[in-house]
Image (cartoon, grey):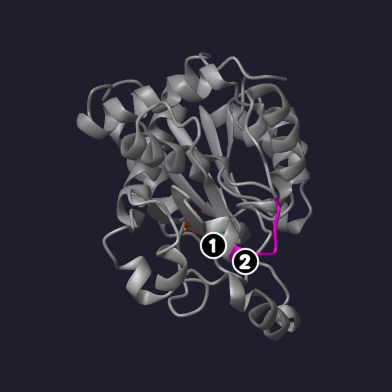
Amino acid sequence: MKDLLRTEHLTRDDVELLLDTAAQFAAEPLRSKDALAHKSVAIYMTKPSTRTRLASQTAVAHLGGSPIVLRGDDLQLGRGESIADTARIFSGYCDAIIVRTFAQSDVDELGKFSTIPVINALTDDDHPTQLLADWLTIRETFGKDVSGRKFVYLGDGNNMAQQAIETAQKIAAKSGATIEVTNDPESAAKDASVLYTDVWMSMGDPESEKQEKIKSLAPFAVTDALLSKTSKDSIFMHCLPAHRGEEVMESVIDGPKSVIWREAFHRRTTIQSLLFHLTRGEIKGSL
Ligand code: CP
Ligand code: NVA
């Protein structure tokens, strides 16, 4: 597989490989310091980013390459040049593209017309590089065998959750996992190993929805009371940025069960791993 456009395109073996290599990059950041020597990676973002942008830039630097950071209005795309033509130009100058934007179809199109790897760094539908960092953090905490463990996502159905349910149901039918969707946060949290949440207003969500969302999602906020229902060894996760006091209470996100800083740290190690393997053509994919 040339690109990472959607999480579901990764096979279990791909994920294992990517996480194993990311763990090595965590221990030894410069272990492949010439892998991208004399190569350039475009990092093109039309939405704000703190973690993904820094993680991408430092990942490229650790592999010996040059990151080229471009904002939405930097390119002729904004003046009507097509994605296909832009993809061809990127392919002539660069060795990979990391892209964050709104429509998933734009990222798919960039992948289709590029000859170099394209990595989805967040769209309205998916955030695959975040999920790799999350899995590595979960694996570090519980080990590789997570069978029998319960993972709970609470809150808004956005690019970190809802879009994946149908696909997850299909994969679960084969893997033996169970996927449940419930409106009862307490029963969801009972004996859970992971409580995960994200902001209730994602980038691009209309402001007009804000008050209604805050009202309807309030019972799904991650509080100490909810956390007390989870298993003894449970962890709290959040992709960040967080709105403390809204989707998660300060005492939880800054408390002993929170692994948010390790999760954020692994954004670099996993993007480094992805760049390393994709540019070497080592990701099999399930396309
Ligand atoms: N988690 C995440 O993608 O953070 P940024 O929006 O800061 O990149
Ligand atoms: N759901 C959030 C994730 C940010 C990393 C957003 O899209 O704004």
Mark sitting on residue 202: 2
Disc 2 residue type (three-letter): Ser
Element type where label 2 sits in the image: loop
Cβ at disc 2 under 8 Å from ligand 2: yes
Give the amino acid type for the residue marked by disc 1 in the picture.
Asp
Task: Tell whether 67 sits left or right of 201.
Answer: left
**Circles 1, 2 touching at the beta carbon (< 8 Å):** yes
Where is 208 relative to 148, above or below? Answer: below
Q: Nearer the viewer, residue 61 or 184?
A: 184
Residue 253 visible? The answer is yes
Q: Neighbour class for label 2 at 10 Å: few (<14), some, many (≥20)?
A: some
Relative horizontal placement of residue 5, taking residue 134 as reference (left or right): right
Q: Quadrant of residue 224?
A: bottom left
Residue drawn at (61%, 70%) of the image: 200
Query: Which residue appears at 42% of the width and 75% of the height?
Result: 249
The span shown in magenta is 181-185
Of residues 266 and 34, the one nearer the viewer is 266
- Residue drawn at point x = 23 percent, y = 23 percent: 31
Residue 13 inside the magenta-drawn segment: no
What residue does disc 1 label? Answer: 198
